[in-house]
Amino acid sequence: MSTAIFQPPNNPPKHIPTNTTPDMDIELHCPDCHYNLIGTTSDRCPSCGWEIDADELADFFTATSAGSPKRWALVAGNLACIAVTLLGTYAMLSAGNKLSLLDACMLLSVMLAVAGHLWLGVSAAASRSYWPMRQGEASAIITFMAGVSIVLGIVGATQGLGFAPTPLINDEGLQVNGPLEFVLIAIFCTLPAWTLLILRFIAYRPARRSMSHRLVKKPIVPTNILTGSSAPFTIALLGNYAPAQIKCHWQDAPPIFPSSTVEHITSAWDAAQRQAHNNQRQLFNGDLIRLIAAKVHCDALHLTLSPTCYRDFVGTNLNRTYHDLPIEQKVFANALGMSVVPVTTDGFIVLGLRNDTVIYHAGWIHTIGGMLEDIDRTEKQVAIVGCALRELSEELLVKENECQPLDMIALACDTSLLQPELILTTQLSLTRRELENRFDASLVGQEHSQLVFVHDSPDEIIPFISRSPQLTPLAQAALLTLGYHDWGQEWYEQTSLLLYDSLPQRVDWRE
């Protein structure tokens, strides 16, 4: 009998290597939006969709170094403008004339421009991570200062309309060289501000390019997981359930498989053992916990659970041949999975790139987690949160006191596995850098070769999913349900429609 074990294509995407040296502070920024590409597994920037070009990225990385000639040329230009402006102002003040209100406007105009040059020069010298600098509040203030300086300079120059050292009077008795004096004074007073604007445009990368690039790239999405295909997962429950609201009901009743399916299960397990032996891995038939039913009652989530084993899970949920049999979902092992979606204190969602030791989804980006095992059960109770904390400890080396209480936000199902999965989220007290420094891919039992991060922002989930073709269905479900939890139903529905042309199918896991 031919048996097919579920295994996605073994062609993980090329990725940007992570920083594996804890004491190095390496950042590799996208030229368009300055998103840090370290750890990115897609061929496009997860933030703006820029198609990663290794040569362009190398040139940009060289230009962003602290010793960039353009950076120090700009700083030198700022210093030169400050020096020349101050010398010219000193010459004007040393003439000994009494300052009028218009003279005060000219003086204030020049001083504002000098302050802007000083601010821009200091910012350029202090910016060590990227060049040109990212636009923000500082660039807006500098632009405003230059604008005010220009206006004050023009106002102060109006006194030249009625004054000239040697007035020229025409036949009608009107002074004709007053306008010329006005232009000359206006040029002198506003030149530092115009120079400031020019240097400001050199120092800060235009935001307009990034926005137009985003508008062009956003509709272009891979058809393998997006437009034209339905969501690769189903949703049984969406909500927000604290640990005290999760009620587990145990039944000592392992699944009973029809006699016609037993041979399929045995054959699949034998094939999996041979594959593990060929890959020099050990495969154990451990005890797992099966989901029978899930329902919400009186603001609590009630889970009906029973025993199952890894052998039955491999023979049913991971067996393509078994999926083709005319049987119902309840005649599967349905080992209950556990996905944890941690969010770092600096705003990153944490995922992992699965290594070659796993039996399925090797080389794919997946959530942090595993499956409920027999060790998670004590008498009639099942420690849902305890299992999640164990996975955080094993895969991320995160301690219980380094994360806030976990909330269950969804019950989803990978349509290719038909495996139910609880999705939980927690806020960590650690930063992305701290997690990267702590992560160890060589640990025994570690299922991930590296960590993958995406900004916890409604604007970055869509490009991240669309540019990551080897993102497991449950990782997609985790990101969307976290968005439902954080940004509401409208965001969830609009994002699902954009990605999949339809909402994820809702299924019923009630008995």
Image: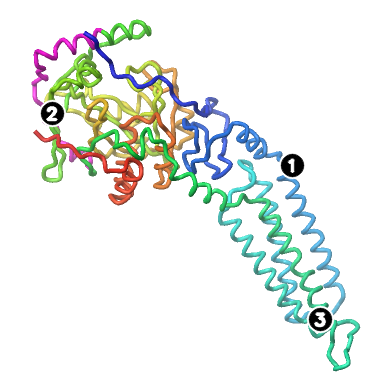
Could you tell me which quadrant the N terminus lies in? top left
The magenta stretch spans residue 242: yes
Residue 178 vs 360, above or below: the answer is: below
Whether residue 429 can be seen here = no
Is 386 positioned to the left or the right of 432 in the image?
Answer: left
In the image, residue 51 lies at what x, y percent?
53, 37
Q: Mark 2 touching mark 1, by CB under 8 A?
A: no
Residue 45 vs 155, above or below: the answer is: above
Give the amino acid type for the residue marked by disc 3 in the picture. Answer: Lys
Give the amino acid type for the residue marked by disc 2 in the picture. Answer: Ile
Badge 2: few (under 14), some or many (20 or more) residues near its Cα, within 10 Å?
many
426 or 230, which lies in front? Answer: 230
Give the amino acid type for the residue marked by disc 1 in the picture. Answer: Pro
Whether residue 74 can be seen here = yes
Residue of label 2: 292
In the image, residue 115 lies at what x, y percent?
69, 61
Residue 463 vs 189, above or below: the answer is: above
Residue of label 3: 98
Residue sticking out furthest to the right: 166
In the image, residue 437 lies at what x, y percent?
49, 28
* Label 2: element kind: strand
Could you tell me which quadrant the C terminus lies in? top left
Please give the range of residues in magenta: 241-270
Q: Earlier in the sequence, mark 3 or mark 2?
A: 3
The magenta stretch spans residue 344: no
Q: Nearer the viewer, mark 3 or mark 1?
A: 1
Residue of label 1: 69
Q: Earlier in the sequence, mark 2 or mark 1?
A: 1
* Label 3: element kind: loop
Image point (15%, 27%), residue name: 329
Q: Nearer the viewer, mark 3 or mark 2?
A: 2
